[in-house]
Amino acid sequence: MKVDVLLGLQWGDEGKGKIVDVLASRYDIIARFQGGPNAGHTIEFDGLKFVLHTIPSGIFAASRLNIVGNGVVIDPYIFSKEVAQLRSKNINPHHNLLISKKAHLILPTHRLLDAVYENTMGENRIGSTLKGIGPAYTDKTARQGIRVGEIHKDDFSSQYRILKEKHHRIIDSYNAGVANIKIDGLDFDSYEKQWLDAIELLKTYHQIDSEHFINSSLRTGKRILAEGAQGTLLDIEFGAYPFVTSSNTIAAGVCSGLGIAPSKVGRVYGTFKAYCTRVGSGPFPTELHDEAGALMRDRGHEYGSTTGRPRRCGWLDLTALKYAIMLNGVTDLVMTKGDVLDAFEQIQVATHYKLNDETIDHLPFEADQVKPLYESIKGWKQSLEEITSQDEFPAAFADYISFIQTHTQTPVNIVSVGPDRRQTIVLL
Ligand code: IMP
């Protein structure tokens, strides 16, 4: 058996959580391999809505195992809130959630550091979700982080204290004054207390050597889906650095974030919106600052599920999409939120860029300097929300999908036309 992967091809928020939830019945195990609570995966069914930040989107079926892999960074406080959200709807993640002992912890002071760095960067700020992601991965690569497996050890408190003191020395060097910085609305001491309580909760969850578990599950024929977070264009290597997140969001991240060999990667489902959005700063070639962008934001409810920030909106960018398909080896495209474009007479799609005076068809290093070149496509001007099969696609919507397939040379095999599980047409 191989591990299939589902990930985002744009700047995150492509609707991955919903698609993982739809595909989950085909898998025995769903595993997160990177990122942390900067993610907000929204899942809606039976009139209920959940936003998951750390816990994989397969948690809703008790028979399915969910793994938080070694590549993930976990904030116990946010994790405890997710657990409470699930338990309030009678879903008990104790039964089917496993956590890698090698996953790293996000400390309260990682969140302070994130805030201090962003506050001091002025115009160059990344637009971070301020969940402590960058500082936690920094400590991981600096070999100073604390892993989940440490929380049971006698010296955990002293490990925590040493790292916290190091962070305070850095913060002091910025003369930033952290007294006024609130974390999730709490002052530092109150937040830290709740964080330490949440460590006790985390201790009650099953912790494993997930790389062994995953490889032996593959040997015994278990079907595994790796669930990506953020998106390809936020990848630490290939996004428009420094306006990126701090992990490998691409398919390569599955190997290091779960401990599987490249030869064990199977299908790669690449999810993209029928248009583009981005939160935070950084290049966005097809961004719209006009009424069309506002209409997309309004119809698509384009406000961050983790931060509530309005998302920047723009037309679909096939040049960037082809880049993402190349980096990930996408086998199946998944298009979401086609219904948001129902209102448009004409839809623009960027197929090339102008860089200086040259026309190019790839996303270059100079991503901040390219100008998109568009083709105009007729809109379908009717609601897609009730569609349940491919036969019901309006002709112009089918043409839009064919246009994308032709340009990317990759099949669109799943189409989502609304937030509910039922509003998904799976063509395979
Ligand atoms: P960080 O990972 O929170 O430090 O944020 C770095 C950049 O990635 C910022 O532009 C964020 O807005 C963006 N980002 C991080 N996580 C997500 C996500 O799950 N969806 C969309 N954008 C994200």
Image (cartoon, rainbow, N blue to C red):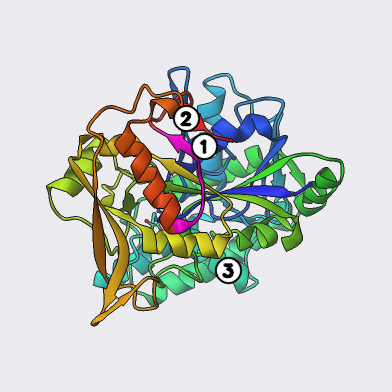
Which amino acid type is shown beneath numbered disc 3? Asp
Q: Is mark 1 within 8 Å of ligand 1?
A: no
Where's residue 158, x and y in %? 66, 61
Crowd around label 1: few <14 · some 14–19 · many ≥20 (10 Å): many
Residue that mark 2 sits on: 424
Q: Is residue 396 left or right of residue 68?
A: left
Where residue 420 sits: x, y (%)?
Answer: 43, 26
- Which quarter of the figure is the C terminus placed in? top right
> Going 26% across and 74% down the picture, which residue do you hit?
354
Q: What type is the residue that disc 1 sits on?
A: Ile
Q: Residues within 10 Å of mark 2 (few under 14, many from 20)?
A: many
Mark sitting earlier along the chain (1/3): 1
Q: Report the Cα–Cα distance between label 1 and label 2.
A: 8 Å
Residue at figure coordinates x 73%, y 52% from the top left: 101
Compared to residue 206, the image places residue 150 above or below, namely below
Residue in the foreground of this view, choosing between 198 and 127: 127
Q: Where is 71 relative to 82, above or below?
A: below
Q: Is residue 360 left or right of residue 132?
A: left
Asked if the residue under mark 2 is in contact with the one under mark 1, i.e. CB atoms within 8 Å, the reply is yes
User: How many angstroms separate mark 1 from mark 3 (CA)?
Assistant: 32 Å
For the view shown, which residue lies furthest in the left direction?
291
Magenta segment boundaries in residue numbering: 408-416
Front tag of 1 and 3? 1
Decide if residue 370 is on the left or right side of residue 245. left
Q: Nearer the viewer, residue 237 or 336?
A: 336
Q: What label sits on residue 375 in the rendered view?
A: none
In the picture of the structure, the residue carrying the numbered disc 3 is 139
Q: Foreground: 11 or 342?
A: 342
Tell me the amino acid under the disc marked 2: Thr
Task: Give the residue at x 58% y 66%.
Answer: 163
Q: Which residue is mark 1?
A: 19
Which of disc 2 and disc 3 is earlier in sequence?
Answer: 3
